[in-house]
Amino acid sequence: RTAALSLLGSSSLAILINRNKFKRRDLFLLFTLFFLMLFLIFELKELAPGSVISRSYESRLLRWKEAFELFRQSPIIGYGFRSFTDIVPVFRYGDEYIDTGSSHNDYIDLLIRGGLLYSTFFWFFIINKIWEGIKSINSQNPLPEYIAYAMVSLLISAFFQNPFKDPIV
């Protein structure tokens, strides 16, 4: 699901920037196929035993709530580069405490581990790479443009997964 949403985001950016190169018929077909694929992915997720989107959504919100409460206690420098599960070992789900496992959100991981300081450097690097890609759109070398699209895809997926996950230090 996350990969499909990321693909939609980066593809939409690529189409928006290069809109003069696409025909409406092609765009309609592309988005129809994409939304069909996304619909099937979500429907199959609901059919899997014990795997419900609403539970996944609720548990992520609870993890994030627990993480933000810790972030407020050390917002500038965070808690260091340990594993997220070392910093936030459990979260409350109803009347029980459940092992966190993962934040399922790299931005929350960045804030918890390195605080605003580390997050600022991260965003400076990311925005710089995307800007380089946008500036190179009409150049002979398309690689920076493609890297920018890939970065947008990663940035979208980072809301729901951990594509930038740091190794345990």
Image (cartoon, rainbow, N blue to C red):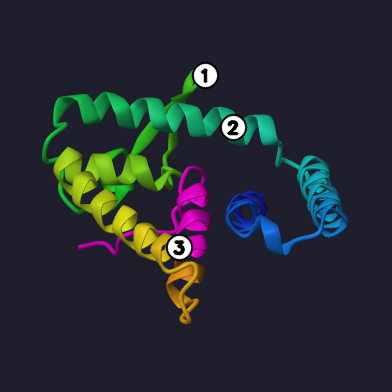
The residue wearing badge 3 is 148
* Residue sitting at x 60%, y 50%: 9
CA distance separating discs 2 and 3: 29 Å
For marks 2 and 1, give the one nearer the viewer: 2
For marks 2 and 3, give the one nearer the viewer: 3
What secondary structure is found at the residue carrying circle 2?
Answer: helix
Cβ atoms at labels 2 and 3 below 8 Å apart? no
What secondary structure is found at the residue carrying circle 3?
Answer: helix
| Residue 154 part of the magenta-drawn span | yes
Q: Quadrant of the C terminus?
A: bottom left
Magenta extent: 148-169
* Residue sitting at x 63%, y 31%: 55
Cβ atoms at labels 2 and 1 below 8 Å apart? no
The label number, if any, that marks residue 57 in the structure image: 2
* Residue sitting at x 67%, y 50%: 1
Q: Nearer the viewer, residue 152 or 112?
A: 152
The label number, if any, that marks residue 159 in the structure image: none
The label number, if any, that marks residue 94 in the structure image: 1
Q: Is residue 135 left or right of residue 118?
A: right
x and y percent of residue 74 in the render? 14, 31
Mark nearer the N terminus (2 vs 3):
2
x and y percent of residue 136 in the render? 42, 69
**157, above or below 58, in the image:** below
| Amino acid at dot 2 | Tyr
x and y percent of residue 3 in the render? 62, 56
